[in-house]
Image (tube, rainbow, N blue to C red):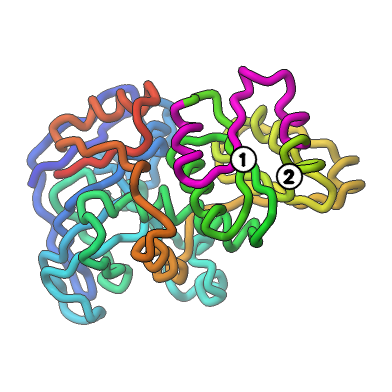
Amino acid sequence: MKAAVFREAGKPLTIEDVPTPRPGAAEALVRVAGCGMCHTDLHYLDHGVKPFKQPPLVLGHEIAGTVAALGDGGSDRRVGDHVLIPSVYGCGRCEFCRRGRENLCVGMIMLGNNIDGGYAEYVVVPARELIPLPDTLPLDRAGVIADALSTPFHAVRNRARVRPGESVVVVGCGGVGLNVVQCAVAAGARVIAVDLNDARLDLATRLGAFATINPQTVSRVDKRVRELTDGGAEVVFEAIGNPRTMELGFSLLRKGARMCVIGYSHEPVTLSAAKLMYYELEVMGSLGCGAGDYPDILHLLESGRLTLDPIVSGTIPLTDINDGFDRLRRGDGIRWVVTP
């Protein structure tokens, strides 16, 4: 089969002929219809972050496709089923998995990190992890549900616990941030989107944000948020992964409010302990999504309360994957999907 192989940081992926994997007991071979391109992969390619599996490695963790073959036992899936593969999955046995928090599993497996991922014609995963997809969803684009949509859904519903009527500010309107916008709108919140890119702010408006703020066009973002919310946000999401935007998000909170950090950064962040205590604020992180949330996500997509458009900017053939990563680096579009 054809695959885009990661061999070392600072070098483009190479398109290679590699052996097609075979499903073992309780495993499934999935023919990849589409695999979303994520900034996480740029950490390996550009920033020297080491994946758990020693290269050569096939990256890609937002995968949808068709069951091509099944090993013996372990699943009620059938050959030909349309399926989504969660970007991460747990062991099913540890304390976190038993409590329904598979995203914190002590033995968590991530596609395109611990094992070969979806920038290839086929991928093998445990059959029990496959999530059936309705025929109404475009299979070549549905893979973005596995991270770009499910991660914001988990952050909005389970971590920040957004309630109807609350004022929510989303700092950063990339693929994750825009999905935070639409998930918070679906939860009944009044959403303000903050970003430097006016085109992305326009998309946030299309997804239901009632107001947008470009920090380059206002003297103070915190003052503008207080004007729009009568005193400050009840919930802030940081979806960039930058200490400065985390500190900005903290400055937008009213008393008794909460901030949820989805963006990743290895750098330290300075927050006022006095404000944290005196305002009774909550600051929390959010990682991925547990398997139990996917049925609700799919229901919201089928009902039209969530959408894959305009999140998916288009598809890219496997042979052009390095061009796709250049688009990510330039910030062109929102989410591109590789179609092996």
**Nearest the eye: 145 or 181:** 181
Note whether 331 is above or below 80 in the view shown: above
- Residue 88 in the image: state x and y as whole percent: 40, 57
Q: Which corner quadrant of the image does residue 124 belong to?
A: bottom left
Which residue is located at x 14 percent, y 44 percent?
340
**Nearest the eye: 52 or 322:** 322
Prevalent SS, magenta region: helix
Q: Which corner quadrant of the image does residue 78 belong to?
A: bottom left
- Residue 155 in the image: state x and y as whole percent: 56, 55
Name the residue tied to disc 1: 192
Which residue is located at x 72 percent, y 18 percent?
219
- Residue 245 in the image: state x and y as whole percent: 64, 31
**Magenta part of the protein: which range?**
199-226
Note whether 301 is above or below 25 in the view shown: above
Q: Amino acid at mark 1?
A: Ile
Q: Amino acid at mark 2?
A: Ala
Label 1: how many Cα within 10 Å (few below 14, some 14–19, many 20+): many
Note whether 161 is above or below 197 in the view shown: below
Which residue is located at x 30 percent, y 23 percent?
326
Q: Earlier in the sequence, mark 2 or mark 1?
A: 1
Residue 90 visible in rendering: no
Name the residue tied to disc 2: 233
Secondary structure under the numbered disc 2 in the rendered image: strand
Q: Which corner quadrant of the image does residue 83 belong to?
A: bottom left
Left or right: 273 with respect to 237? right
Secondary structure under the numbered disc 1 in the rendered image: strand
- Residue 195 in the image: state x and y as whole percent: 55, 29
